Image (spheres, coloured by chain):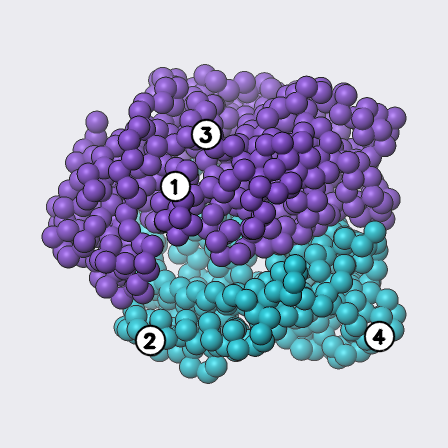
Amino acid sequence: MSGLAEGAASAVERAVEAGAGDAEAYASEAENREVRVHGGEVESLTAATERGLGLRVWIGGRVGYGFGTDLSAAGLAAIAARAVEAARVADEDEFAMPAGRAGGGGAVSGLTDPSHAEWSLAQIADLALAVERTALEADPRVAAVEQAVYFDSGERVAIASSSGLGCEYETTSCYAYLQVLADGEAGRETGLGFDLARGPAGLDPAAIGREGAERATEMIGSSKPASRNCPVVLDPTVAASFVGLLGDAVGADAVQRGRSPLAERLGEEVAGEAFVLYDDGLDPEGFATAPVDAEGTPRRRTPLIESGRLQTFLHDSYTARRGGTATTGNAGRSGYRAPPGVSASNLIVSPGTAGLDQLLREAGEGVYVNDVAGLHSGVNPVTGVFSVGASGRAIGGGERAEPLREFTIASDLVSMLRAVRAAGSEPRWVPFGGSVSSPPLLIGEMTVSGS
Amino acid sequence: MRVLSGGTTYFAHVDGLDPADLERAAGEAAAALRGDRVEPRSLRAEATSPQPIEQDPEGVPASRKAELLRELDERARAAGAEIGQAMASYGEARREVAVANSEGLFSGDDRTRVRIGAQAVARRGDRVETGAETLGAHRGFELFDDDPASIAASAAGKALTLLDAGPAPTGSMPVVVGGGFGGVLFHEMTGHGLEADHIQKGASVYAGKLGEAVAQPLLTAYDDGRLPGEWGSDAIDDEGTPTQKTRVIEDGRLVGFLYDRQSAEQDGAASTGNGRRESFRYLPIPRMTNTYIAPGEAEPEAIIGEVEKGFYAVSFAGGQVDPATGDFVFGVNEGYLIEGGKVTRPCRGATLVGNCLQALAAIDAVGNDFWMKTGICGKGGQKVPVGTGQGHVRIAAMTVGGTAA
């Protein structure tokens, strides 16, 4: 392919020459494009290439990390020298050693879309303009579009290690979103529309624009709800945000540090039976899908919550060794600049059989939550206790009624999961806070604070 | 590399300074251009004055940094038998910046920042609570000359306090916000709405309000990128404009917005030195530097003493605002009930929600105590270091969302 695999293999050799007992190199190369449009004009066009290599080395139980962008022989030697130097001053850790060389990790199909390479800058700019135009034309109350954005990326990854690991894969992905501004009597309302795909041909710009317009205009005339405990229906985008938090809580790293609300709850009842969750690193529709994880272990499907019970935690090779178990192939990394750590791949909530209408009817009187804000400040990651800002619609007589804003919903993650009464039948992929697919969820009762 | 043509920005970036990569990126950015070319003016180097650094952290041995971390760890654990866990972090960064443009500007900066953090987990039975504290500055290792480990004791103290916390109240009530990082409230609810890009797109509740009263006369606020040693300070912004002190609210009146070059040009104004970016991989956009409410006249004790029943938010876990609607939300990580003018019991899991315009206008007391704290601000997917500051501030009424029914 691109010399990436050779670079990774060569970096491992340089590290061993520099004094490392073991070494693992992760090289990546990405081409990214972004178009931002506003008011029918292209505001900015970005073309970027990113290429670099991260090198993890072990000297006995001491680990060091280095990274750089110069993949020449001299550049790799410099990265190796820095990583080895870092390892020499690190504390000894009996569980620190490279990932084993597991079998499997064959090809996963469907990770690239030819339209990604075929569409020109002009074509993707037209796509972003179409997203904006659809929103502007969708409803006379739409005042403007703050921004419509299209982004795509083609990435190649190669991993090599001194234990003989060598693998390489390629993915493409793209997304588009817009923030719509609608005018009501009491002021501005905003609404987000988005979609994601492997390539631009897989996006429906009109649907994205319409969603943003609908979400903004439906909020016109919103008021604060009265404070009370009531049934709550979470929009798939909101459910996905909470599931993303759950992804951190099931990571063995957080569990082993005692920093997870699910620590010591393995096998226990942590959710209503309607809530079924698994991590699937091989689902072709998931953006975290790859043949292997960030340290070369094959990705797989791992049931997390079934029959209401917590089935397992997610592991990389380090937490697995520390916990006396096997890795689940959940080493993730944000790029070559940072070493790997445990993270969920694609989190998937199994859809139920009830349509959204049926969920609303079951809720009767309550609140439909369309959006939450402040998830990163309003949730205690150790206890799972949360109180987050929310907006949405009232549920009255089993249907969505007047718009609501400026309220909070509060509970803790486990209580909320146990209160899940039903999962909707229509899941959606959501890229906020990880790669998550979730249907709408009906929660039996939550604390709503408004006026 | 940014090329401006008409209303469109063409942007390209590459990792590394390999001349072949740079030329390819420049070619890509320029290839999309239409119309007449502009002859670049020859560069004239401008002298800048980077923040002075007394002790370059790079020269401090790794063993000294490890020792600092162990001190933090020990101080947190020593705070009480219920402290089950402590974590400490140390970070240093030096960034050399050079900016050149076709108008002949050629400027630079040399930025060194250090920051430590401590987090403590306290346990009692099933109760688990965490407390965190940070110390950072645009300075060198000299920042840690005094008693840096006191932040670990403070983090542990917060976690221990929370073990005794009850549920937070719900409903509308007076809220007293603590000094320092309490300033994140102003940062979120007002600062973002004053960034000129939001204003120009009509996506700010402060659009069209220049010169109008948006707060009571007791409130004056600034954005100041020149405060010596502060976390959000730099000599120049990331477009090469020298940083400055900008008054944004004067005696309750809105008097200024925060501009980068492009938004300034659109308004026929001058850049206020707020064109910031996370790195070369991002386009500069209007961003705050150090934003603060200037000290007022009220005694902090009196600010609390006048509240019959309310909530005291000492520090926040963070917050978020939609500048277009003005709706905001803040997670409180250290909060107390105020009853009969006294701070009584600690509360867990409170969130403040409200609307910027109403909440800003409802500030009816500003304390004469004042200090700054460090923050990392996110906007448009870019994170930059910012300072926030204020003394104690009281908001006459605000919605507290707690877990108490």
The secondary element bearing badge 2 is classed as: helix
The secondary element bearing badge 1 is classed as: loop
The CA span between labels 3 and 2 is 45 Å
Question: Do marks 4 and 2 share a chain?
Answer: yes
Mark 2 Cα within 10 Å, few/some/many (few <14, many 20+)?
A: few
> Residue A128, relative to residue A316: is it above or below?
above
Chain with colour purple in the figure: A
> Residue B159, relative to residue A131: is it above or below?
below
Residue matched to label 4: B341
Which amino acid does the dot numbered 4 rest on? Gly
Residue B186's x, y, as percent? 66, 60
A153 to the left or right of A177: left
Chain with colour cyan in the figure: B
Residue matched to label 3: A301
Which amino acid does the dot numbered 2 rest on? Arg
> Residue A450, relative to residue B129: is it above or below?
above
Question: Do marks 3 and 2 share a chain?
Answer: no
